[in-house]
Image (spheres, coloured by chain):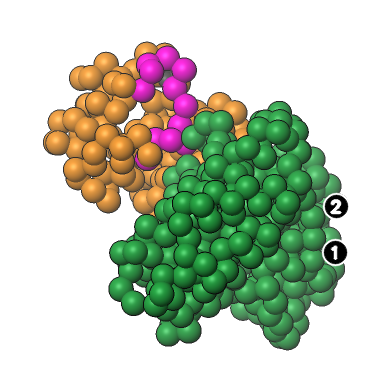
């Protein structure tokens, strides 16, 4: 373990305490939620400078609120808690999130938080890809001031987020699409306990004529420095009936939107081929789910 | 940096000095002598350190001890506290789901959470539940069988 400079492990119960700790330790304070990623950093010797760990799980950020405008998820809500929310099972538009949350092993789902999963800015994680396709917005707080922005702006690079010093993610908001909509997520991994070679989430809104009025596709897992939105593929779907031909051409277009690389998990060429297949299958699954959705 | 904490393990309160950056696994094994919980990879990759915290399976090698304060920790030793084996333990014995045994406690603890949520899991649900646990000996088949047997009441 590399926390040799650690002076304090605090579990603040209110924001005044958080601000006091952040004020005292500044850049040497480190936020801890489920700890499943922090432990990895610690074990790799990356936390030498940290003097205070701030466990944020007693700040009342563990909540799920289904509202008419969408879904609000508190940052310290665990994957397991979110999976158990009735709204997740009942809402085809949230299908991608339900699919992605089921990926990590149970021992991780019981501790990993939604906020930690996006703050880590790891393009190989699964829920962030689903959240990108669901057009998530992030709310952050620092010193009592709150700001909100699209999730994509959080990802500054691999393992790098755009949070300013002292900012803590408090909530994710998923706007509820209008009309008939559904989403789906798929992952290809080497084994049941591994991160994605490629993952893909697709979210569709279908109008009364059966055309895609909105399409969002996101890909992760070694296809770029951050999770990528497949905008070329999305454009091909916009305003069209997603028949076989359209689906194949949208999947093919994904090649223009991603920049796969080679690593110990897979080659770039393999990732490209898989990204196309997963895109087509995720779209097909979202489409099938939308067909079962009441308008 | 050492810090004094009170931990509730298997229904007993323990006041113990722990490293502030130490993992729960180290305290359980090295501090409290509860060596049924095993140390394998120490990085969340094998599952043999699984314990229950407030009834939920976690990797004890990845949880800071201080994050476990005020929560109910259950280790394998807590399952047979009154001297009688838990139905899951009985089923593992009766099915022959144990070879070297190093992984066994982790499987039993994760299955304990599963069976607290459902008493009739199908094979898919069982396999999904144990996906975060590795066994290098048995080939999993008998482990799945043992969990199904325990679900049926042994
Ligand atoms: C064995 C194993 C298997 C895994 N398998 C998968 C998998 O299949 N799919 C998958 O998607 N993921 C997987 N993961 C990764 C897991 O999902 C992440 O580790 C987890 O989402 C991180 O969340 P956490 O709450 O544990 O964050 P922590 O580890 O507590 O924190 C993560 C990072 O975010 C920061 N942070 C946390 N919360 C906030 C906040 N509210 N505001 C600002 N900063 C914050 C922390 O400072 C830290 O840098 C796996 C991990 C392990 C160890
Ligand atoms: S020792 Fe904890 S998961 Fe391997
Ligand atoms: S019985 Fe030997 S590792 Fe499972």
The chain under label 1 reads A
Q: Give the quadrant of the C terminus of chain B.
A: top left
Q: Which residue is found at the position 42% from the left and 53% from the top?
A: A285
Left or right, B111 with respect to A234, comes to: left
Label 1 environment density (alpha carbons within 10 Å; few <14, some 14–19, many ≥20) = some
**Image point 73% across, 42% down: which residue?**
A260
* Residue A115 drawn at (x, y percent): 61, 64
For the question of whether residue B38 can be seen, the reply is yes
> Ligand 1: does it lie within 8 Å of the C-beta at label 2?
no
Residue A27 is tagged as 1
Instruction: Determine which residue is flagged by label 2.
Output: A49
Expressed as whole percent of the image width and height from the top left, the position of residue A67 reads 43, 83
The quadrant in which residue A290 appears is: bottom left
Residue A126 visible in the picture: no
Q: Which chain is green?
A: A
- Chain identifier of the residue bearing label 2 in the image: A
Magenta residue check for B19: no
Pick whichever, A135 or B99, lies toward us: A135
């Amino acid at each position: 373990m590399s926390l040799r400079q650690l002076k304090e492990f605090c579990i603040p119960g209110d924001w005044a305490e958080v601000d006091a700790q952040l004020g005292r330790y500044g850049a040497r304070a480190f936020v801890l939620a489920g700890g499943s990623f922090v432990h990895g950093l610690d074990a790799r010797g990356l936390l030498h400078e940290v003097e205070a760990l701030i466990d944020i799980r007693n700040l009342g950020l563990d909540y799920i609120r289904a509202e008419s405008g969408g879904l609000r998820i508190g940052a310290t809500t665990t994957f397991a808690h979110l999976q158990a929310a009735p709204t997740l099972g009942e809402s085809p538009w949230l299908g991608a999130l339900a699919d992605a949350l089921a990926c990590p092993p149970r021992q991780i789902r019981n501790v990993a938080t939604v906020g930690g999963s996006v703050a880590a800015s790891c393009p190989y994680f699964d829920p962030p890809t689903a959240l990108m396709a669901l057009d998530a917005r992030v709310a952050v707080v620092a010193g009592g001031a709150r700001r909100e922005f699209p999730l994509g702006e959080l990802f500054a690079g691999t393992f790098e987020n755009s949070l300013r010093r002292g900012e803590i993610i408090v909530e994710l908001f998923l706007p509820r699409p209008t009309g008939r909509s559904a989403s789906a997520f798929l992952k290809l991994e080497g084994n049941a306990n591994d991160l994605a070679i490629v993952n893909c989430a697709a979210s569709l809104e279908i109008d009364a004529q059966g055309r895609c009025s909105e399409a969002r596709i996101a890909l992760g897992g070694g296809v770029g420095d951050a999770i990528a939105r497949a905008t070329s593929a999305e454009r091909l779907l916009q305003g069209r009936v997603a028949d076989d031909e359209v689906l194949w051409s949208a999947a093919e277009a994904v090649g223009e939107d991603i920049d796969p690389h080679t690593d110990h998990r897979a080659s770039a060429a393999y990732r490209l081929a898989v990204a196309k297949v997963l895109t087509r299958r995720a779209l097909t699954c979202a489409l099938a789910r939308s067909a079962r959705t009441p308008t | 940096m050492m810090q004094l904490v009170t931990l509730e393990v298997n229904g007993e309160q323990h006041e113990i000095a722990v490293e502030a950056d130490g993992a729960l696994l180290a305290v359980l094994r090295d501090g409290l002598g509860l060596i049924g919980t095993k140390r394998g990879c120490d990085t969340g990759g094998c599952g043999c350190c699984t314990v229950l915290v407030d009834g939920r399976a976690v990797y004890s090698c990845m949880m800071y001890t201080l994050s476990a304060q005020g929560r109910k920790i259950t280790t394998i030793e807590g399952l047979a506290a009154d001297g009688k084996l838990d139905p899951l333990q009985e089923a593992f014995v009766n099915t022959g789901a144990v070879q070297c045994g190093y992984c066994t406690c982790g499987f039993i603890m994760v299955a304990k959470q599963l069976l607290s949520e459902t008493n009739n899991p199908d094979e898919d649900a069982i396999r999904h539940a144990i996906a975060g646990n590795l066994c290098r000996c048995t080939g999993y088949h008998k482990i799945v069988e043992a969990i199904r047997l325990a679900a049926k009441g042994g």
